[in-house]
Image: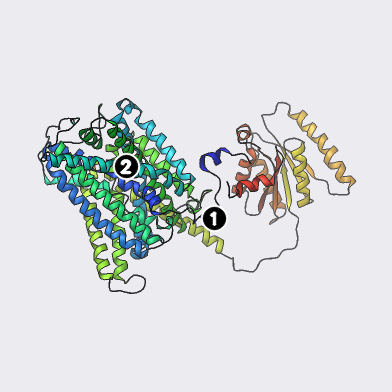
């Protein structure tokens, strides 16, 4: 079977029994779920320095204690999620934890916050990666937004192919990034120690900006709040436990420990070297912009091959850190949709056992943000972290309640310690959330604050809609089936002219009932109405009425109806209404001849009036109507080809 365009881009369909084989080990889980956290070292310290730089040289002195505070909070959060993975072995996502322990409203609030955070993470990660590229190649700065959208499209396609494929592809850049950043930091620290804390940069960073204000507690809080963006993504492990192979808990914990340890060391190393080399954040919108990591790598190695390898690895990993969201967002939407708070399409796996609707929705949302903010990282940062820390707080509070109640099997000896760990996590992240809201509100965080409750209200409306449908479907379902004497339905067949497809539709209609009426609607589009109508009457008498009389059958009737507004729907609805007036309760079948396109390009050449007609009839035709499509295939039917598309061989 030839490879279709969809198969080439996304891959052939995957059978359900292959789900376990396609799950991740630790080496694949680190790049698939951990790149968000690992790569945040590229923009978290820079976000903090962009605020602290207002104090000039004083920012270098306070950067280290601010980073230590962030790392302490990161370790507390990692310890809390260590407990979450143990308690929720199938899925320890914030939605499940908050819903089970704090109630459905808390679950929806946590899910909404995390969905918004995932969307922002994609935008921030990609924009930060492209900022790294434009630091190394300044000529590309004018192409920032198009480059962001190209990267987004590539990540989307790879994730539509499957989580396992994404984890394999991202593995090499992820480990190269860890090695390159580790080498840069280690070499820079060794040079600092050997020079007595005053290393000479190979390429001097731009001079520090002049102080615009004195260092204050308020400035420290704002710097801390911006720096907390480096902690987003830690929750992805507990959200994606189901994506791991057995044994899940040890694999999840190993992945979590690796991420927390590497990220902590990276943040501390960047803060130390930024101080000793005198590196600060630059304005991304101005020419000559360089990221903090670009300045740091240039100071340590100069613009030699190690510099470009480091920046290339940063570019890859920061751009591809969006993959963490592409793993977590669809799975979160699946859980929410399963409970009826999102459209049910979000809960259905696609052709590659990936929740494709969630992937595409995330792409649309993050792409919109990139366009609105022109792919500029610093403009996106103020919206960031509010959703993540709200989700952190609700998740840890939910786990504290879980251990307070005694877990799943009653209070154990170690539950008090677990309660203290998750309680400390909830308290720490709650305080951090308050700081973030206080310091970032007027800078753009108010958008997230407004968006979260609006989204929760939307989710509740969706749930009420599904409950209404389920209630109506269930009403009377337990009553005995009402049996009626057979009454032939009235069958209406709209036809444009006598041809092969009309002949097939009338033939099919006569199998349903002897009461068949063909309806020919004349419109103002026709120039020779009388000639066309007479030709159709002659054909009808010759090919329908005469054979029916010779066979002793009831003759199908032909009705000519004028439509002043070129609509087929209105005349059909009037005919259906006329049948109901004559015989109330009688079922009406509408048989629609329909051309089935053989190739994708033929879709562009058809009017598709049949599909629109079907939709309108089902919407306005009433409860006792049935719409039947009779296909006319432009290419020969091949059932085996259809089976091959739905059930490809395992070799594909």
Q: Nearer the viewer, residue 101 or 211?
A: 211
In the rendering, which numbered label is found on residue 145?
none
Vertical comparison of 455 with 477: above or below: above
User: Residue 427, percent across and down?
Assistant: 22, 59
Asked whether residue 627 appears in the rendered view, the answer is yes
The answer, for residue 104, to whether it is visible in the render is no
Number of disc labels: 2
Q: Residue furthest front?
A: 194
Spatial CA distance of label 2 from label 1 is 35 Å
Instruction: Give how far across and how far down residue 648 sits, in percent.
Output: 60, 48
The quadrant holding residue 182 is: top left
Q: Residue at x 65, y 33 (%)?
A: 564
**Which quarter of the picture shows residue 495?**
top right
Residue 200 lies left or right of residue 15; in this view the side is left
Q: Residue furthest right?
A: 550
Q: Residue at 32% across / 67% down in the picture?
A: 402
Which quadrant holds the N terminus? top right
Q: Nearer the viewer, residue 507 or 380?
A: 380
Hey, which quadrant is residue 193 in on the image? top left
Question: Sequence order check: which comes first, mark 2 or mark 1?
Answer: 1
Look at discs 2 and 1 and give the one toward the viewer: 2
Residue that label 1 marks: 16
| SS for dot 1 | helix
Residue at 16 percent across and 46 percent down: it is: 64
Q: Which residue is mark 2?
A: 177
Q: Depth check: 28 or 540 in front?
A: 28
Q: Residue at x 34, y 31 (%)?
A: 144
């Amino acid at each position: 079977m030839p490879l279709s365009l969809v198969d080439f881009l996304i891959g052939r369909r995957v059978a359900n029994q292959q789900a376990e084989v396609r799950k991740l080990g630790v080496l694949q889980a680190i790049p698939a779920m951990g790149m968000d956290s690992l790569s945040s070292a590229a923009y978290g310290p820079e976000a903090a320095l962009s605020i602290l730089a207002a104090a000039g040289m004083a920012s270098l002195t306070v950067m280290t204690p601010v980073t230590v505070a962030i790392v302490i909070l990161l370790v507390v959060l990692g310890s809390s999620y260590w407990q979450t993975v143990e308690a929720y072995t199938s899925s320890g996502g914030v939605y499940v934890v908050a819903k089970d322990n704090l109630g459905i409203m808390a679950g929806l609030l946590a899910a909404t916050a995390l969905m918004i955070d995932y969307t922002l993470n994609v935008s921030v990660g990609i924009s930060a990666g492209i900022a790294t590229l434009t630091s190394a190649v300044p000529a590309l700065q004018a192409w920032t937004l198009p480059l962001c959208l190209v990267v987004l499209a590539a990540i989307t396609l790879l994730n539509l192919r499957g989580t396992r494929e994404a984890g394999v592809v991202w593995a090499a850049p992820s480990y190269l990034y860890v090695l390159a950043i580790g080498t840069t930091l280690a070499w820079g620290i060794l040079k600092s120690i050997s020079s007595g804390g005053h290393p000479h940069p190979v390429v001097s960073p731009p001079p520090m900006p002049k102080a615009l204000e004195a260092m204050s507690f308020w400035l420290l809080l704002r710097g801390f709040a911006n720096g907390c963006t480096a902690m987003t993504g830690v929750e992805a492990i507990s959200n994606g436990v189901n994506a791991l192979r057995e044994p899940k808990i040890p694999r999840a914990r190993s992945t979590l420990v690796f991420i927390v340890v590497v990220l902590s060391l990276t943040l501390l190393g960047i803060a130390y070297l930024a101080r000793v080399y005198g590196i600060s954040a630059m304005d991304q919108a101005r020419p000559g912009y360089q990221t903090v990591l670009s300045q740091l790598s240039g100071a340590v190695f100069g613009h030699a091959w190690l510099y470009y390898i480091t920046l290339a690895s940063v570019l890859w990993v920061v751009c591809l850190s969006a993959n963490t969201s592409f793993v977590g967002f669809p799975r979160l939407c699946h859980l929410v949709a399963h409970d009826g708070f999102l459209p049910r399409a979000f809960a259905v796996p696609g052709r590659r056992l990936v929740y494709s609707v969630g992937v595409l929705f995330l792409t649309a949302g993050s792409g919109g943000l990139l366009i609105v903010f022109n792919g500029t990282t610093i403009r996106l940062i103020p919206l960031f972290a509010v959703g993540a820390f709200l989700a952190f707080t609700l998740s840890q509070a939910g786990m504290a309640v879980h251990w307070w109640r005694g877990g799943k099997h009653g209070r154990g000896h170690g539950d008090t310690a677990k309660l203290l760990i998750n309680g400390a996590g909830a308290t720490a992240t709650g305080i951090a959330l308050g700081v973030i809201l206080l310091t970032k509100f007027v800078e753009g965080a108010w958008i997230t604050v407004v968006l979260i409750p609006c989204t929760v209200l939307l989710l509740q409306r969706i749930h009420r809609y599904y409950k209404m449908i389920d209630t109506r479907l269930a009403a009377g379902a337990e009553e005995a089936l009402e049996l009626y004497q057979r009454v032939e339905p009235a069958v209406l067949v709209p036809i444009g002219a006598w041809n092969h497809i009309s002949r097939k539709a009338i033939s099919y209609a006569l199998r349903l009932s002897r009461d068949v009426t063909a309806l020919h609607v004349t419109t103002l589009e026709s120039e020779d109405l009388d000639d066309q109508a007479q030709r159709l009457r002659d054909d009808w008498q010759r090919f329908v009425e005469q054979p029916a009389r010779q066979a002793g059958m009831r003759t199908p009737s032909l009705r000519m109806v004028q439509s002043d507004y070129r609509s087929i729907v209105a005349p059909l609805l009037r005919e259906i209404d006329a049948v109901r007036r004559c015989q109330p309760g009688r079922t009406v079948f509408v048989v629609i001849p329909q051309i089935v396109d053989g190739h994708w390009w033929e879709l562009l050449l058809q009017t598709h009036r049949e599909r629109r007609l079907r939709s309108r009839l089902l919407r306005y035709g009433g409860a006792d109507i049935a719409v039947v499509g009779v296909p006319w295939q432009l290419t020969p039917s091949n059932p085996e080809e259809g089976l091959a598309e739905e059930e490809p061989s395992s070799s594909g």
